[in-house]
């Protein structure tokens, strides 16, 4: 006899065997027991959650000669025929391959005749969203007012594609993703029945990878058993079979990202690829790893939710202290976008490597999250002893900065600064920190600042010929009276430095000898990102 896959061999044959859909099972059993059976049902939910299985069980239950508490007996001739697929009163139609009007017309002709055995004719239409518009229109009238002995059960994974006219004629049941614990418990039962020795850790990992689908979990278990036939199913064996990556690699990768070590992250990607691991699964697992970290940061009572060993849990707790919630959320966003891209990409490795660079270098991301992470990085460096003194004379090379075309411009400044100017310069970081509006912080990052001695004016320098698109946008926001950006900056300076100033916008001049600060060097340096106001003496 040929081998039967586990998901077929252990497919539930009665309601009590269905796992993870108690809300649906209870409702259907009560309808059957009280004889309040509807004429049309719509089962919707992700793959492998039991839609077709429950549809077949219901087809048996409504026709069973000896039902038990709303569940089929699986012993009478009707139940046996349905289990064997030989019953003429239960018809299963795959709408993916039979989506035309002719298939529906055949059903319409058949429903005119009562069942030859049992009480009901049951039509199960799987993947019903694949039906053509004409087929849906042909089904409408029969679906709304079928003969009393006909039941329609429609199943779909994409309910959004079902016409509203069909939805309004059906009782809708939403199938939930099955929890990891429920799947793991079921896998353990089946392993015991099959005489398979498997580690709990291996079972739990398969349940997690299945992503809420019992059928996927059984298929993965079947694959692992076949790969290591006759051997115990260990966690390492499952990782190898499924092309997954051990947690230790994720720990190394995260630390490289925190240290902004691009070369280290690329080496890990190369290590994963060379070892034959599935790179899409690698991205998914790393996303889960970051999910565990943010859960730990959210609460200290997450040990039960995070399915890892005590050793790995201690490692996660240690790494959770090295990052912020905002950083982890940015990492997860980048990886989620990557997961969607690599599904259909031919050069998956290239996309993964680009994502690793994004994780390490928030400076290349134009969004607010990237700017805020750079600000946090600057604050950390300041706290660790990098002293900011915008008044002093400094050499750019002493800060570890590499000069590019824009930073090569030397800015002239007088030796002696008035006391009020010194006060603004010394408090410039606090001034930025005290601005609550993130968009204004970004605007300041795009401007060059000139502290003049002209009546307490604070000038924003603007070179119309050389300004980038971001700088032009920033200047327009500052000059826009309705935006109140200028007022916010003035009020913050007065609050922090106790100095009343007036913001003005001036065209830059190479001969300008005012006292210049350039915040762009702090925000835009993609080399060292160190907070440093570079100035030279006349």
Image (cartoon, grey):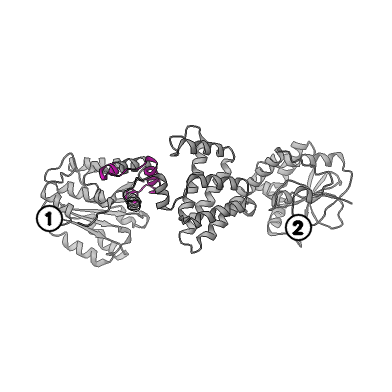
Helix, strand or loop at disc 1?
Answer: loop
Q: What mark, if any, has residue 439 been given in the picture?
A: none
Q: How crowded is mark 1: few (under 14 residues within 10 Å), some or many (20 or more)?
A: some
Q: How crowded is mark 2: few (under 14 residues within 10 Å), some or many (20 or more)?
A: few
Which residue occupies the foreground of this view, 385 or 455?
385
| Horizontal side of residue 93 vs 439, given as left or right | left
- Between circles 2 and 1, the one closer to the viewer is 2
Instruction: From the top left corner, tell me how far across and down residue 353 is, in percent.
Output: 56, 57
Residue 214 counted in the magenta span = yes
Q: Earlier in the sequence, mark 2 or mark 1?
A: 1
Q: Could you tell me which residue is drawn at 25 percent across and 40 percent down?
A: 26
User: What residue would you read off at disc 1?
Assistant: 115
Which residue occupies the foreground of this view, 312 or 84?
312
Instruction: From the top left corner, tell me how far across and down residue 536 is, in percent.
Output: 85, 50
Instruction: From the top left corner, tell me how far across and down residue 477 is, in percent.
Output: 69, 52
Residue 335 counted in the magenta span = no
Q: Could you tell me which residue is drawn at 30 percent across and 62 percent down?
A: 96
Helix, strand or loop at disc 2?
Answer: loop
Residue 119, visible in the rendered structure = no
Look at the image and tell me in which quarter the N terminus lies. bottom left
Q: Which residue lies furthest to the top in this view?
A: 301
Instruction: From the top left corner, tell me how far across and down residue 344 is, in percent.
Output: 46, 62
- SS assignment for the magenta stretch, majority: helix
Q: Distance between the residues labelled 2 and 1?
A: 83 Å
Instruction: Write the start and end of the magenta stretch as one range.
Output: 189-218
| Horizontal side of residue 452 vs 75, given as left or right | right
- Hey, which quadrant is residue 507 in on the image? bottom right
Residue 322, visible in the rendered structure = yes
Which residue occupies the foreground of this view, 202 or 445?
202
| Horizontal side of residue 435 vs 105, given as left or right | right
User: What residue would you read off at disc 2?
Assistant: 406
């Amino acid at each position: 006899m040929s081998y039967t896959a586990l998901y077929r061999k252990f497919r539930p044959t009665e309601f009590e065997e269905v796992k993870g859909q108690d809300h649906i099972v209870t409702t259907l059993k009560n309808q059957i027991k009280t004889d309040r059976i509807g004429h049309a049902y719509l089962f919707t939910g992700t793959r492998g959650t039991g839609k077709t299985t429950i549809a077949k069980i219901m087809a048996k239950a409504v026709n069973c000669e000896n039902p038990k508490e709303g569940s089929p007996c699986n012993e009478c001739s009707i139940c046996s025929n349905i289990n064997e697929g030989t019953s003429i009163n239960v018809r299963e139609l795959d709408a993916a391959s039979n989506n035309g009007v002719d298939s529906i017309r055949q059903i319409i002709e058949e429903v005119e005749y009562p069942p030859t055995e049992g009480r009901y004719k049951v039509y199960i239409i799987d993947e019903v969203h694949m039906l053509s518009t004409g087929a849906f229109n042909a089904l409408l009238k029969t679906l709304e007012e079928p003969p009393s002995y006909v039941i329609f059960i429609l199943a779909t994974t994409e309910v959004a594609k079902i016409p509203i006219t069909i939805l309004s004629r059906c009782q809708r049941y939403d199938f939930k993703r099955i929890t990891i614990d429920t799947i793991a418990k079921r896998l353990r039962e089946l392993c015991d029945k099959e005489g398979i020795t498997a580690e709990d850790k291996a079972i739990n990992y398969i349940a997690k990878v299945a992503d809420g689908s019992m059928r996927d979990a059984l298929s993965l278990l079947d694959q692992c058993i076949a790969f290591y036939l006759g051997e115990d199913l260990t966690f390492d064996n499952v990782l190898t079979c499924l092309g997954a990556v051990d947690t230790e690699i994720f720990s190394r990768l995260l630390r490289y990202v925190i240290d902004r070590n691009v070369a280290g992250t690329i080496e890990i990607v190369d290590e994963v690829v060379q070892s034959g691991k599935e790179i899409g699964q690698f991205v998914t697992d790393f996303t889960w790893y970051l999910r565990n970290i943010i859960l730990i940061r959210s609460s200290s009572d997450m040990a039960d939710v995070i399915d890892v060993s005590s050793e790995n849990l201690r490692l996660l707790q240690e790494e959770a202290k090295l990052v912020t919630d905002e950083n982890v959320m940015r990492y997860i966003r980048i990886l989620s976008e990557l997961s969607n891209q690599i599904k259909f990409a031919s050069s998956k490795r290239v996309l993964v490597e680009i994502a690793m660079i994004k994780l390490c270098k928030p400076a290349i991301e134009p969004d607010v999250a990237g700017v805020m992470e750079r600000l946090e990085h600057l604050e950390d460096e300041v706290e660790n002893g990098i002293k900011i003194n915008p008044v002093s004379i400094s050499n750019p090379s002493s800060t570890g900065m590499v000069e590019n075309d824009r930073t090569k411009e030397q800015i002239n400044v007088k030796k002696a600064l008035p006391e009020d100017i010194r006060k603004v310069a010394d408090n410039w970081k606090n001034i930025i920190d005290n601005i609550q509006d993130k968009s204004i912080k970004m605007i300041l990052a795009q401007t060059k600042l000139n502290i003049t001695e002209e009546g307490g004016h604070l000038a924003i320098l603007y070179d119309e010929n050389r300004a980038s698109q971001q700088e032009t946008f920033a200047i327009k926001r500052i000059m826009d009276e309705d935006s109140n950006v200028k007022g916010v900056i003035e009020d913050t300076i007065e609050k922090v430095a106790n100095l009343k100033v007036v913001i003005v916008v001036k065209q830059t001049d190479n001969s300008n000898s005012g006292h210049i600060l350039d915040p762009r060097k702090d925000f835009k340096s993609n080399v060292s990102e160190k907070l440093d106001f570079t100035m030279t003496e006349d």
